[in-house]
Amino acid sequence: MYLEKITGPADFRHFSVEKLNALSAEVRERILSVISETGGHLASSLGAVELTVALHTVYNTPEDKIVWDVGHQCYAHKILTGRNEQFPTIRQYGGLSGFPRTEESPFDVFDVGHASTSISVALGLVQARELNQGKFDVIAVIGDGSMTGGLAFEGLNNAGVLKKNLTVILNDNKMSISPNVGAMSSYLTKVLSDPRYNKLKSDIWEVTGRFKHFGEKLRVADGHNLEEMIRTFKNIRANISGPVLIHVITKKGKGYRPAESNSPKFHGVGSFEKKTGETLTSSPLPSYSTLFGRTLVALAERDPKIVGITAAMPTGTGLDIFAQKFPDRYFDVGIAEGHAVTFAGGLARGGLKPVVALYSTFLQRALDNIIHDVALQKLNVLFCLDRGGLTPDDGPTHHGAFDISFLRAIPGAILMSPRDENELQHMMFTGLRQNGPVFIRYPRGLTQGVLLDREFRELPLGGFEVIAKGKESVILALGEMVERAMRVRDEILKRGHDVGVVNMRFVKPLDYGALAGFLQPYTCLFSLEAGTIIGGLSSAIQEMLFHENIIPRAMVPFGFPDHFIPHGNKEELYDDLGLSVGKISDKIHKTLMVSE
């Protein structure tokens, strides 16, 4: 056993190749054993074990800097850099992050979580090194899926112009989360014989080809052959200057047959039976993603102009259900959210009805495209935003905390959030019948099991639903927080206060007249949302109150505070944020007691 004695890379840099292979096997088993119990990003980390061992063996980390792209593959890196004992806490409240985090370790060079950033970050570190007269190496590790993102090409182009010493490792496993799409994916298999891509030929490929001792072998390496990779990395350090691109071939899920045969399932997985790969938790209820996919199919069967678009997340968003039914009307553009939005604008201008399915956090990357290429022209594009609110285990890079705030500012935008799956299907139907951009945000996780109406119906814009009227105060809740508001009401009733609950449905537009008329009798108002309160639902309500000259005794917002939220169990995070049923109830009770 070698792993239990490893406190950092210095402990294994002197190992023979045989010992390093044995260490790699132990690391792979450690990842598999822990993630089978905790869940996590398994397949990508299993595929990068030998690559990680080779990098830390050759390079003098943390003085030399390794920049990981996205970070799904960083588990071996964490285990080998002094965090093996903590590894069972990964993605748990107060434990290790599932992505590189600078606050965790000096070996984590940059906080990551979104794709295609590593080359730009690494180039920035290189230029800082030059200006500060430093003498360390910088290595960017980018997956083939991340190479479909435009930011990666921008970084490569700039690297070729600056001609600084930078090593880019393309970790090619033929698959990101779902099978890769686009010209770049097919190009990777041909690039050695026909290296024509922009700056790659003149500034990167030709540089790597100068090292005659290895010739063509320098350009492609077996990502599971430690001897080959170590030899390649050592010779690059010693003999090559300028930007270097190494094409490393790996297998996602390497060493675990279920993950090798079904890597999308094991990209991000819950706890599972290690021997069989079968998940340990299941539910008869569909997820919101699945319900979205089924609803879109039902709508598309009625309307041949409906098309679906995603950015490398067909399975995660549920759009794979639509793709199976309507392959000619389905478009996966790769990790290119900005292009997805502008492409949708073109489809809408061409007379189609595009539905863009993205995670809330990834839509942030396409804000400019939304404003200029959809909203400005009043094009009807329906954006269905999965993972609105907390995406608990993945932490701050993945929480959908800001969508309400930044989308509210867009003229003509319509923004909705359903309380349950039945309302989601009606919102989708409503969204496809509007002029201009429409956004529907819903949470990660299972639906509530309510009965679905057989027929779709259009919801009145800005309309809200009074669930419980109450006498002295009311909670204005949005989306998944409506159910929480009802539980809070039950608690407050026990304390002698009759608090109403309203399902807001819309954040924009709000029916000022109807809402003002309803709220006028209440002395205390409370808003409840799964998003930042800065610019969110609470801000929208307070703007309405000011406009209508309504001044309640108290207006108390409940939502995400003005800081980034860590990873952890959802209820633990809610409690930490003051959004547990108990803490909301306590604050409402105190407010009502003071207001009497």
Image (cartoon, grey):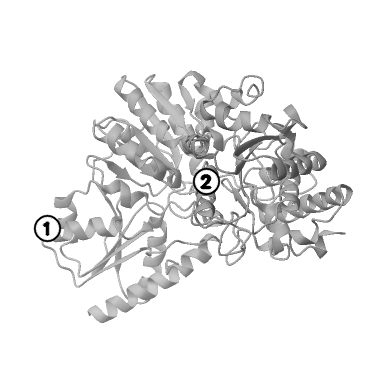
Q: In the depicted view, which residue is nearer to us: 80 or 285?
A: 80
Q: Position of residue 240 (x, y in %)?
A: 67, 39
- 10 Å neighbourhood of mark 1: few (<14), some, or many (≥20)? some
Indicate which disc residue 41 carries.
Answer: none
Q: Is 323 on the left or on the right of 30, as rendered?
A: left
The residue under label 1 is 548
Quick one: quadrant of the N terminus? bottom right
Foreground pick, 160 / 288:
160
Task: Say whether disc 2 or disc 1 marks the residue closer to the N-terminus.
Answer: 2
Dot 2: few (<14), some (14–19), or many (≥20) neighbours within 10 Å?
A: many
Question: Would residue 508 be visible to someone looking at this image?
Answer: yes
Task: Report the quarter where the C terminus lies.
Answer: bottom left
Is residue 172 at all visible to an observer of this figure?
no
Query: In the rendering, at what x and y percent does residue 461 appear?
Result: 24, 41
Q: Residue furthest left?
A: 549
**C-alpha gap between disc 2 and disc 1:** 53 Å
Q: Is residue 582 left or right of residue 7?
A: left
Residue name at image x 80 percent, y 46 percent = 275
Q: Which element is circle 1 on? A: loop
Residue type at the position of mark 1: Glu
Residue depicted at x 38% and y 33%: 341
Residue topped by disc 2:
123
- Up the image or down, 582 lies above or below 190; here it is below
Mark 2 element type: helix
Residue 187 location, quadrant: top right
Mark nearest the camera among 2 and 1 is: 2
363 and 288: which is toward the camera:
363
Quarter assignment of residue 484: bottom left
| Kind of residue at badge 2 | Leu
- The residue drawn where x is 83% and y is 50% is 20
* Residue 591 in picture, x, y percent from top left: 29, 76
